[in-house]
Image (cartoon, grey):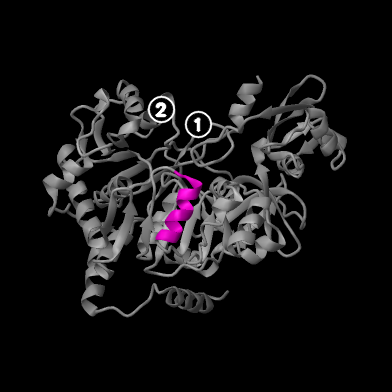
């Protein structure tokens, strides 16, 4: 696409979505002033929405609703309160919260102070939390009361850690003795409402943690969301419209949920959220609030379609224009089932903490190939290369490399990603079909070499999943004296179904080469997952040992 062509594509896309719309001249001036005051961060959209539609609903959670004007005033008050607690030296503010207004208020306030916001995984253990707080040099933590025991342990090693409670069971419901006397966000808002922070000397950044399913999660810095080009790339592929309603079920501490929150604010879309995911409650939120968008991680969509038939029949989801998912591979049968019940509205995105949105599959793509990650979005180039960095042919598996307008600014620990020429090596393996659709087959470090043969776990997992008795499966490589590695499979059976390990081995043997048949087969009640729904294969390896 030429530079002129790209410009007109950008304009048409923004007009079609409602991002470019006629406003009073004074509103344009006030929006420009907001950008000048706090810079263009991922959360600047809240301030812009407060100018564009101050009395429209900004968010809805279990405590009720807030307008954009109310949310802007509250985040200003939190920013002023944080500055008073740390005497203006807010550097890195850690946020350990589920999806609710406190998460949004703390995140936006941190950006207004020009500090780094460190988004913490709600599934962390105490040692993980401590390690990340110390490594990232956080001097403040905003957390939900349920995580007080974890923070208590971290406090012993994290020096001078200022604490703020974001969510309690009541206005002063500090039921856990570990949280007695800790300031709450509501306290800060009550004390500083009407105040606003000054213009920061630096631009606030968001530190997102990688999933860490195979090791310690790394922190990836982002100042903004990739600019207007990244916004248009999403709008070009997924039918967002401004000033509508989105249910964000994906955890907001994760890159995908965080992105959907930031995107909704930029689009002046009402964000509906719930602290804990429940499949039926999510359907109820969509219908009750007539949402046009639903943002999930794949396991959430799978849990929805696994609901009993009579439960699914209670909800129409007739207002939905799109369900957007990312974060891990979706079960192909779940994608097809959801669209059969609720219509062709699923969009599957391949997204990386380090590179933003890479590709997206439309409902038409998913009907043709339910396990595809779609095609690269505008502004992103994708190559699949071999170990020597040479492009592979269609259908061949290789390393996925990305050149993107939205690449991150680097890891906080100083580590660097591998690059092939100017393309970042994603760490994932994939292939393309004859129509240019991308298929992610697994992580580079998950490939198993057994007797000199390369085996991709996903191929074996998909074969096991095709068995009528199997609900889901995970395959890992374990040490073997004769072959270097051998395959070990862990399966969860469908309710009311039965299958022996020998049955499952015979099923795989009839469809794949002999060296791809798992030697070990273990039936589990469920697979271990992290807070974003990804299977934690490291835990399976530990259990096997």
Q: Give the quarter of the image for residue 30.
A: bottom left
First to last magenta residue range: 277-288
Q: Measuring 20% from the left and 43% from the top, which residue is drawn there?
A: 186
Q: Is residue 160 left or right of residue 123?
A: left
Residue under label 2? 131
Q: Give the quarter of the image for residue 527.
A: top right
Q: Measuring 42% from the left and 24% from the top, which residue is drawn there?
A: 127
Q: Is residue 45 left or right of residue 513?
A: left
Q: Is residue 444 magenta?
A: no
Q: Measuring 62% from the left and 22% from the top, which residue is drawn there?
A: 543
Circle 2: is it few (<14), some (14-19), or many (20+) Cα within 10 Å?
some
Q: How many marks overall?
A: 2
Q: Say if 37 sits above or below 9 in the image.
A: above
Labelled pair 2, 1 in contact (Cβ < 8 Å): yes
Q: Is residue 281 magenta?
A: yes
User: Mark on residue 216?
Assistant: 1
Q: Is residue 533 left or right of residue 243?
A: right
Residue 399 x %, y %: 67, 47
Circle 1: is it few (<14), some (14-19), or many (20+) Cα within 10 Å?
few
Residue 116 x %, y %: 32, 44
């Amino acid at each position: 696409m030429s530079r002129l062509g790209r410009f007109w594509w950008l304009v048409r896309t923004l007009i079609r979505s409602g991002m470019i719309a006629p406003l009073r001249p004074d509103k344009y001036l006030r929006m420009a002033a907001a950008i000048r005051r706090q810079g263009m961060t991922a959360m600047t959209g809240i301030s812009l929405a407060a100018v564009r539609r101050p009395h429209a609903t900004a968010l809805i959670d279990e405590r009720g609703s807030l307008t954009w004007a109310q949310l802007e005033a509250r985040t200003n008050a939190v920013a002023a309160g944080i500055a008073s607690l740390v005497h203006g030296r807010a550097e890195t503010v850690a946020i350990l919260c589920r999806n609710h207004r406190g998460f949004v208020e703390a995140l936006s306030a941190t950006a207004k102070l020009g500090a780094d916001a460190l988004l913490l995984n709600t599934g962390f253990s105490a040692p993980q939390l401590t390690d990340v707080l110390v490594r990232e040099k956080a001097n403040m933590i905003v957390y939900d009361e349920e995580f007080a025991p974890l923070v208590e342990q971290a406090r012993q090693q994290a020096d001078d850690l200022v604490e703020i409670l974001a969510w309690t069971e009541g206005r002063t419901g500090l039921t856990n003795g570990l949280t007695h006397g800790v300031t709450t966000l509501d306290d800060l808002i009550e004390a500083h409402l009407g105040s606003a922070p000054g213009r920061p000397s630096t631009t606030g950044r968001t530190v997102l943690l990688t999933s860490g399913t195979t090791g310690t999660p790394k922190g990836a810095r982002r100042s903004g969301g990739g600019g207007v080009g990244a916004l248009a790339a999403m709008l070009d592929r997924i039918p967002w419209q401004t000033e509508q309603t989105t249910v964000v079920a994906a955890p907001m501490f994760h890159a995908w949920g965080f992105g959907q929150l930031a995107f909704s604010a930029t689009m002046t879309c009402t964000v509906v959220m719930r602290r804990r995911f429940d499949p039926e409650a999510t359907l109820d939120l969509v219908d009750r609030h007539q949402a046009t968008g639903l943002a999930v991680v794949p396991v959430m969509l799978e849990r929805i379609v696994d609901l009993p038939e009579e439960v699914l029949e209670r909800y129409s989801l007739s207002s939905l224009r799109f369900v957007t998912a990312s974060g891990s591979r979706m079960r192909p049968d779940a994608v097809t089932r959801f669209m059969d019940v609720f219509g062709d509205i699923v969009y599957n995105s391949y997204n990386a903490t380090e590179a933003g949105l890479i590709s997206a599959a439309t409902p038409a793509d998913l009907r043709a190939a339910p396990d595809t990650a779609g095609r690269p979005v505008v502004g992103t180039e994708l190559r699949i290369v071999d170990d020597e960095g040479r492009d592979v042919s269609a259908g061949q598996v290789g390393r996925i490399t990305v050149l993107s307008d939205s690449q991150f600014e680097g890891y906080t620990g100083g580590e660097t990603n591998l690059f092939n020429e100017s393309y970042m090596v994603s760490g994932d393996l994939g292939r393309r079909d004859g129509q240019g659709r991308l298929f992610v087959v697994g992580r580079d470090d998950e490939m198993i070499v057994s007797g000199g043969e390369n085996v991709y776990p996903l191929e074996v997992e998909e074969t096991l999943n095709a068995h009528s008795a199997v609900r889901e499966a995970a395959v890992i490589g374990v040490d073997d004296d004769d072959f270097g590695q051998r395959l070990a499979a862990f399966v969860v059976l469908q309710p009311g179904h039965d299958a022996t390990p020998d049955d499952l081995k015979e099923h795989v043997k009839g469809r794949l080469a002999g060296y791809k048949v798992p030697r070990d087969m273990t039936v589990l009640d469920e697979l271990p997952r992290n807070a974003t729904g990804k299977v934690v294969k490291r835990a399976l390896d530990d259990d096997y040992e």
